[in-house]
Image (tube, rainbow, N blue to C red):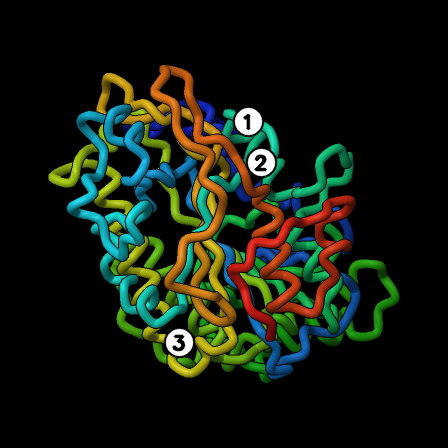
Amino acid sequence: MTQTPAPLPGCCEDFARATALTRRGVLRGLGVAGAAWTIGSAVVQSSPVAAAEAGSGTGSVVVLSLRGAADGMSLVVPHGDPVYAAARPRIAVPASAVLASDGFFGLHPELAPLLPLWQAGSMAAVHATGLPAPNRSHFAAMEEVEDANPGSTERVGWLNRLVGDLPGDGPLQGISVGTESTAMFGPAARMSFSALDDAVVAGDDQWDPTDDRLRSLHRMWGRSGHPLAGSLRSAVDAVADLAPAKAVAAGDYPTTDLGKALSSVARTLKGDVGARVITVDQGDWDMHTDLGTLSWGNMNTNARRLAKALAAFFTDLGDVASRVTVVVLSEFGRRVVENDNYGLDHGWGNVMLLLGAGVRGGRYYGTWPGLENTYDADLTVTTDYRSVLAEVVATRTSASVATVFPGFTPETVGAMTSL
């Protein structure tokens, strides 16, 4: 029996259940088509095809999910709306403290490491984004956001549809670092590993084609007509194809979980192994209590970790940054009014951050709906989150927006430029 872990301090039981995805659960989710193979700590879902083509030179998209429903109004502060400060008398970020203010919006001061990107026009924010209707369940909202196909009974995520619509068909085109995102679930081949150096054939510290056990595997499955044979060959080959990424030296990162994960992402991208979509998570954003003030609290800590890790990531990428776009999003936002515990309860609208290649940066996008100072008030969604993602897909990949987001007609956001 799989036990749900105890909630983290300040987070709700729903979030603990939503994130209690065990290895067994991952393998169930991967079993949509083809076969799932565990290679060391890596889980590879592969079709019976060759490994990913490397070095095609096209752009890559990194999707960073802030798990637990981050408060977008703390990260990108609407200090120009008088209701904001009135509704949060203890936890509001004062206008005098925000960064990159345009007179209405400003960045949380702990996002200072990202200011060079903002000032260089490589970072933007889109506010009042989210699902078309409120959904305050972490589990249901994550699934809805990552399937991005309302009403469908198919268990296929939007990123899996994206990967499936790209040229090539190997598992290294779509990679999850850490727990696999449900946005990656589906029939297209993809791979997940907890850390790049852990993606090995179990029992081997490094890839060695002369290894007797590996030669035996190839001999056993090389000519087999078994339905699983192609998948096994593809999975083992995928681990071998990661060798150029493993040869890349790690950059200088914070020793946080996000810092370590983004280090693996950067090495994978710099190794040019064919990765086109990579997902990574940062958790612990479910701040019902102790979100805090500028002097203390969980928001300061998480925002600082987020900014330092992303700043290190873009520094580490170097010239490769010219083809990498990062999207930061969360399953939903928080209420307008603070609660009695220096925190915020589940809400609706949120902010999305765009960083890197193709971003029309140094600007805040979206239509601000205005806030209400009532107990149950939400930030109303005025931009469907899929419109933002569709713009990234259309401008940074060759995939069809209609295929990735079936039945959806996106509105123009204007935050991205073409390839």
Nearer to me, 354 or 271: 354
The label shown at residue 134 is 1
CA gap between label 2 and label 3 equals: 32 Å
Q: Which of the 4 quarters of the picture holds residue 418?
A: bottom right
Residue at horizontal 67%, vertical 57%? 45
- Please name which of the two marks, 3 or 1, marks the residue nearer to the observer: 1
Whether label 2 touches label 3, CB < 8 Å: no
- Can see residue 226? yes
Q: Is 37 placed above or below 311 here?
A: above
Indicate the amino acid at tag 1.
Pro
Whether label 2 touches label 1, CB < 8 Å: yes
Q: Position of residue 120 (x, y in %)?
A: 34, 72
Q: Which of the 4 quarters of the picture holds residue 170?
A: bottom right
- Placement of the C terminus among the 4 image quadrants: bottom right
Asked which secondary structure carries label 1, the reply is: loop
Residue at horizontal 27%, vertical 71%? 252
Q: Position of residue 36 (x, y in %)?
A: 68, 53
